[in-house]
Image (tube, coloured by chain):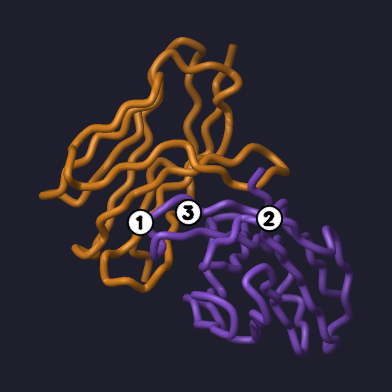
Amino acid sequence: EAAVTQSPRNKVAVTGGKVTLSCNQTNNHNNMYWYRQDTGHGLRLIHYSYGAGSTEKGDIPDGYKASRPSQENFSLILELATPSQTSVYFCASGDNGGQDTQYFGPGTRLLVL
Amino acid sequence: QQQVRQSPQSLTVWEGETAILNCSYEDSTFDYFPWYWQFPRESPALLIAIRPVSNKKEDGRFTIFFNKREKKLSLHITDSQPGDSATYFCAASSNTGNYKYVFGAGTRLKVIA
């Protein structure tokens, strides 16, 4: 069964603190994605990756870093969290050069105080 | 710049009616258009997708109509059911190999019994 898991599922952070969101996929997909979802904006792409060792900037990368140490794992890092980064974050995996289904994880709710 | 636009923002229909959700895009290199649906507190999941080689794609009660000349597409849900109540996202992916989707802001559909 295809699976994308995320941890933690919920996180409360303080302004200026470091936050790491983790994603693991067992689909053996080359491509992985990090989105944030806010009311009125739909899903916006933060960073994505073509495979282990690669990271690419998405449409809203400012304030975020990403790391893809292996085929299965893709992390999103907020070095200095700000209240504007309060959101729901989704990880997804996909293949076929982005022209096929993306499978989403359950999401992480992040609150930055 | 929002490259994929959806309308209406929200839509309410009665059970049994046909719901019509609209999507338009700007980038002529987009050539894969998936629709995702998302139930409250769940993650998005693929509902149906179309490639411009055809102007219609059907899957049960869900049909995509595609107009390449006008850069518009629509999702028709016939015999709408309360269980169809969800947020529907139109997305687009380019054939230029940048491996990513652009999502619209979504249409929130409510089906009243």
Q: Nearer the viewer, mark 1 or mark 2?
A: 2
Q: Residue at x 76, y 61 (%)?
A: A6
Is B11 above or below relative to A106? Answer: above
Horizontally, residue A95 falls left or right of residue A2, namely: left
First reached walking from the N terminus: tag 1 or tag 3: 1
How far from the left and from the top, in percent, is residue A53?
A: 59, 85
Name which residue type carries label 1.
Ala
- C-alpha separation, residue under disc 2 versus residue under disc 3: 23 Å
Name which residue type carries label 3.
Ala
Q: Which residue is mark 2?
A: A4
Which SS class for mark 2? strand
Which SS class for mark 3? loop
**Badge 1, how many Cα within 10 Å: few under 14, some, many 20+?**
many
The numbered mark at residue B105 is 3
Q: Residue at x 18, y 37 (%)?
A: B55
Q: Which residue is mark 1?
A: B92
Hue used for the chain lettered B = orange
Q: Which chain is purple?
A: A
